[in-house]
Image (spheres, rainbow, N blue to C red):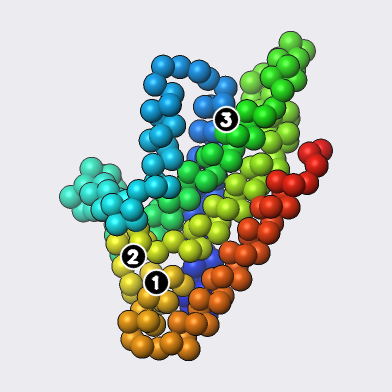
Amino acid sequence: MLQPLLLTLQVALLATLIAGALGIGAGHWMARHRFAGQGTLDAILVLPMVLPPTVLGYYLIVLIGRNGPIGRWLDAAFGIQLLFTWQGAVLASAVVGFPLAYKAARAAFEEIDPRLLQAARTLGSSEREVFWRIALPLAKRGIGAGLALTLARCIGEFGATLMVAGNLPGRTQTLSVAIYSAVQAGDDPLALTLTVIVSVLCIVLLVLANRLLQSPRS
């Protein structure tokens, strides 16, 4: 029981870091620019949120499998194979969690008064300085809430992770997959215990997200 918990936390934290970094970057860029086809691009970026996990998992297998374009390149250049590894589970969770981080970051950046950013540019600040010293601090609560939701989503991820990483005890078996295995084996006490653990972790993160969103902005 401890092994799936530790692996889940490892996978979820790394996936949240990846999804968070990409989501913040994409959210900031989308909040600053207006262009034709922006709505279509936004729909593509949030697509993992609504696609069936099996469809998303299949897309990932096609891309990172040994015969996929990314998988073939990784194998030839670095000898890396992501299928049926915990790193593959990280990738699957990051893809699933990305829309939550992205939407929260974009909304947070769009709430910033553009006059504040323009004033900083007028005073000689570079775009990098405007982002790190003004935009990011002002958007930190919304981004923090989004990251909490992303982490909760990554902890509970099942479908895409099962397809990409499989169900290898001690190697790729996360909490959600372990619950599935316990139910299949008829081990109801273990399934109930793992379910309670996942539920408690997600509730804590949801409470944290709500507090971040309800707190007054500094």
Give percent across and percent down for residue 28.
Answer: 57, 30
The three-letter code of the residue at mark 3 reads His
Mark 2: secondary structure: helix
Q: Which residue is disc 2 drawn over?
A: 162
Marked residue nearer the N-terminal end (3 or 2)? 3
Q: Residue at x 43, y 87 (%)?
A: 188
Q: Nearer the viewer, residue 197 or 29?
A: 197
Q: Quadrant of the C terminus?
A: top right
Q: Is residue 102 above or below residue 209?
A: above
Indicate left or right for 64 with 113 as reference.
left
Indicate left or right for 94 with 69 as reference.
right
The three-letter code of the residue at mark 1 reads Val
- Corner quadrant of residue 44: top left
Marked residue nearer the N-terminal end (3 or 1)? 3
Q: Is residue 169 above or below residue 19?
A: below
Marked residue nearer the N-terminal end (1 or 2)? 2
Disc 3/disc 1 C-alpha distance (Å): 34 Å
Q: Which residue is disc 3 drawn over?
A: 28
Mark 1: secondary structure: helix
Q: Residue at x 40, y 53 (%)?
A: 91
Give percent across and percent down for residue 164.
Answer: 31, 60
Q: Which residue is disc 1 drawn over?
A: 177
The three-letter code of the residue at mark 2 reads Leu
Q: How many residues crowd around disc 2 within 10 Å: few (fewer than 14), some, or many (20 or more)?
A: many
Q: Is residue 34 visible?
A: yes
Q: How many residues crowd around disc 1 within 10 Å: few (fewer than 14), some, or many (20 or more)?
A: many
Q: Are marks 1 and 2 in contact (CB under 8 Å)?
A: yes
Q: Nearer the viewer, residue 28 or 185?
A: 185
Q: Nearer the viewer, residue 66 or 15?
A: 15
Residue lying farthest to the left in this orientation:
67
Q: Residue at x 69, y 19 (%)?
A: 114
Q: How many residues crowd around disc 3 within 10 Å: few (fewer than 14), some, or many (20 or more)?
A: many
